[in-house]
Image: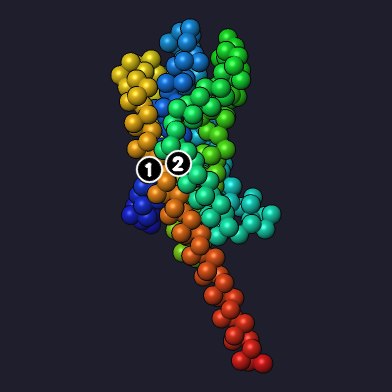
Amino acid sequence: MTNFANLSGAFLLAFPALFSIVNPLGASLIFAEVTDGRSDRERAVLARMVAFYGLLILLVSLWIGSTLLAFFGITIGALRIAGGLVVAVRAWSMLQAPEVNEAKKTNQASQDGRTAIADVSSTAFFPLTMPFTVGPGSISVAIALGAERPERAGLLRRIEFLSGACLAAAAVCLIVWIAYASAPRLVHMLGRSGTRIVTRLVALILLCIGVQIIISGVQDVLMNLMQQLNEQHVTGQAA
């Protein structure tokens, strides 16, 4: 039977991390800029396609990202530490200079200075989904979150955790869809200064989450080290 406390706990861990790194409100301002001149219908189609592609990338990263890394001999502890560092560094840069991040995303979305071409479908995945909406940072966060699943708690507990994280990814992508589709109204309502305030607030949350993931990784490494030392000690006594 599904434990909704476990499900909600995973959701509450994953949602702020993914929301902060994707930053749909801030990205919607740039989306409005690079889709200037398109009709409302074209913008709505683009928003839906970007949200769908983004969800696929996040789900794949959550479910099999850590498994692929493990195939190359990368431990869960190392993955958590590396992922936490990526999250923390990204959050720190967002806290210090959100306008620099905006300029970078604008350049990505407009294909290095060229205005997005007229065909809606040709720009939905690249560059508007990747790397503009769900880039390397978002993928790293999703992989790190997937690595947070409780390995020693049984299959059901792992499925509950990943299901909660997937619900969080779906919620973030739903917000992306709504924010992008209504980007001109958000631009008018928030403005750039308001968006930068929101960006700094979510960046602080993201920094805390990154530190927490690092702590989990360090604990995992120390526990494995202590277990190995204990096994060596027992083996030495038996000999």
Q: Is residue 77 visible?
A: yes
Q: Quadrant of the N terminus?
A: bottom left
Q: Which of the numbered marks, if any, corresponds to residue 204?
A: 1
Crowding at dot 2, Cα within 10 Å, few <14 / some 14-19 / many 20+, comes out as many
Q: Quadrant of the C terminus?
A: bottom right
Q: Earlier in the sequence, mark 1 or mark 2?
A: 2
Residue at the (57%, 38%) spot, across then down: 136
How are the colours assigned in the image?
A: rainbow
Residue at the (64%, 50%) spot, across then down: 68
Give the amino acid type for the residue marked by disc 2 in the picture.
Ala
Q: Report the residue that reaches farthest toward the right.
A: 72
User: Where is residue 133 shown, x and y percent of the image?
Assistant: 51, 29
Give the amino acid type for the residue marked by disc 1 in the picture.
Leu
State if disc 2 and disc 1 touch (CB < 8 Å).
yes
- Say what secondary structure mark 1 lies in: helix
User: Where is residue 118 shown, x and y percent of the image?
Assistant: 58, 9
Q: Report the residue that reaches farthest toward the front.
A: 96
Distance from label 1 to label 2 (Cα)?
7 Å
- Say what secondary structure mark 2 lies in: helix
User: Where is residue 72 shown, x and y percent of the image?
Assistant: 69, 54
Q: Quadrant of residue 76?
A: bottom right
Q: Is residue 159 visible?
A: no
Q: Relative to 74, say whether 137 is above or below.
A: above
Q: Which of the numbered marks, if any, corresponds to residue 91?
A: 2
Q: Relative to 120, say whether 4 is above or below.
A: below
Relative placement, left or right, of 131 versus 162 is right
- Taking depth in this image into account, of 12 and 132 the one nearest to the observer is 132
